[in-house]
């Protein structure tokens, strides 16, 4: 794997009004025609908002006891297929999802809400959406783009941040993503909207909320087992969760699990003129206002 020749970094282009790369549009017909099942659970996020964390929590809740062998043999990206992906090093996400024999199927997407295949809404599937404050999300995305050869070249941080604020990122603007999904929550009652920062603050509490949304009632012992299994250091050292088996990611540049923290400090180094474009909808203010430092 180490000597695998990597394709050149992809270019961004406009796709139905959203910046995308071909890795997420090559399989578009199958994505749009994807047949969701009523018990599918869609895990939706803007990239780098805590997708893997929530995916792992759900996987442990549903299959931690019934299929313990998954924990040592199947990387998370095979347990929870990335619906719109078509990286050529793995079968496309739609194919991986179609092949899943589990019930429920856990399926990951970074699509903005308006591009999600309609069958998820027709089947009234449960959706777990994770939002992360813009600053930490941008920093995490920057480091990810440095090490992930399947995303466009990030360039330097200043230009990257400007691009982030302009919404010229794969999957489009952060703001449109978090607000689009928030608005959908108002009409789709089976959508649980989670904040990364709340998960950091009290994983146990968020686990309880998640279980209540999913209609699960694990024992206290089982919940503790899940909570322990998804702690940052545990996941960082778990090759089935930390993406270390993916050849297009260069861990010498940055690990996938980098800091996994939310540092609620305010840095005056922020230029207030930058804020309007990062300004969140009111529901994200409490998190974002605590995290205005743009330092790396
Ligand atoms: P950082 O780059 O800030 O460390 P995604 O899975 O959506 O790509 O998000 C990746 C981000 O979630 C990374 O953030 C990663 O460290 C963080 N993350 C993953 N697992 C985590 C965990 N168990 N606890 C806290 N953060 C976690």
Image (cartoon, rainbow, N blue to C red):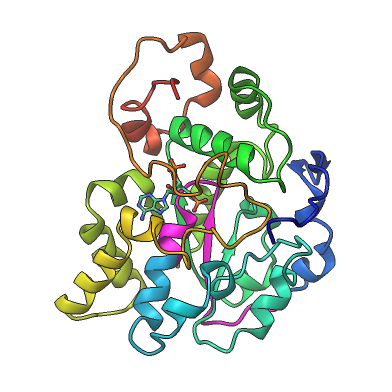
Answer left or right for 5 relative to 134.
right
User: What residue lies at 21% left-to-right and 61% top-to-bottom?
Assistant: 204
Residue 278 pos. (x, y %): 51, 25
* Quadrant holding the N terminus: bottom right
The quarter in which the C terminus is drawn is top left
Q: Quadrant location of residue 191?
A: bottom left
Instruction: Identify the residue shown where x is 59% and y is 78%.
Output: 123
On screen, residue 35 above or below 19: below
Q: Return the residue nearer the eye: 150 or 191.
A: 150
Residue ID at (61%, 70%): 81
Judge whether residue 5 can be spotted in this image: yes
- In the rendered image, residue 11, in percent from the top left (x then y), is placed at 82, 39
Looking at the rendering, the stretch of residues picked out in magenta corresponds to 35-55
Is there any visible trace of residue 191 in the rendered image? no
**Residue 259 coordinates in the image, percent (x, y):** 38, 41
Residue 51 is covered by the magenta coloring: yes
Asked whether, in this view, residue 226 is left or right of residue 82, the answer is left
């Amino acid at each position: 794997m180490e000597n695998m020749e990597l394709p050149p970094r992809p270019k961004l282009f406009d796709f139905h009004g959203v910046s995308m790369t071909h890795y997420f549009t090559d399989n578009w017909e199958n994505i749009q025609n994807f047949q969701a099942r009523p018990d599918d659970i869609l895990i939706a996020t803007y990239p780098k908002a805590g997708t893997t964390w929530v995916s792992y929590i759900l996987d442990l809740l549903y299959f931690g006891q019934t299929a313990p062998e998954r924990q040592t043999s199947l990387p998370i990206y095979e347990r929870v297929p990335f619906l719109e992906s078509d990286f050529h090093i793995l079968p496309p996400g739609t194919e991986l999802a179609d092949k899943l024999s589990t019930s429920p199927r856990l399926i990951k997407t970074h699509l903005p809400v308006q591009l999600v295949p309609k069958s998820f809404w027709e089947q009234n599937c449960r959706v777990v959406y994770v939002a992360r404050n813009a600053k930490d999300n941008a920093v995490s995305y920057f480091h990810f783009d440095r090490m992930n050869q399947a995303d466009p070249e990030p360039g330097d941080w200043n230009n990257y941040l400007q691009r982030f604020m302009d919404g010229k990122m794969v999957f489009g603007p952060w703001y449109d993503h978090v607000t689009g999904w928030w608005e959908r929550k108002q009409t789709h009652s089976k959508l649980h909207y989670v904040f990364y920062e709340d998960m950091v603050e009290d994983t146990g509490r968020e686990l309880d909320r998640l279980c209540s949304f999913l209609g699960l009632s694990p024992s206290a012992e089982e919940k503790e087992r899940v909570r322990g299994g998804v702690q940052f250091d545990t996941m960082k050292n778990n090759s089935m969760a930390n993406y270390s088996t993916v050849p297009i990611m260069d861990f010498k540049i940055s690990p996938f699990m980098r800091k996994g923290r939310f540092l609620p400090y305010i840095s005056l180094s922020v230029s207030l003129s930058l804020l309007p474009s990062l300004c969140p909808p009111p529901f994200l203010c409490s998190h974002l206002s605590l995290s205005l430092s743009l330092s790396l």
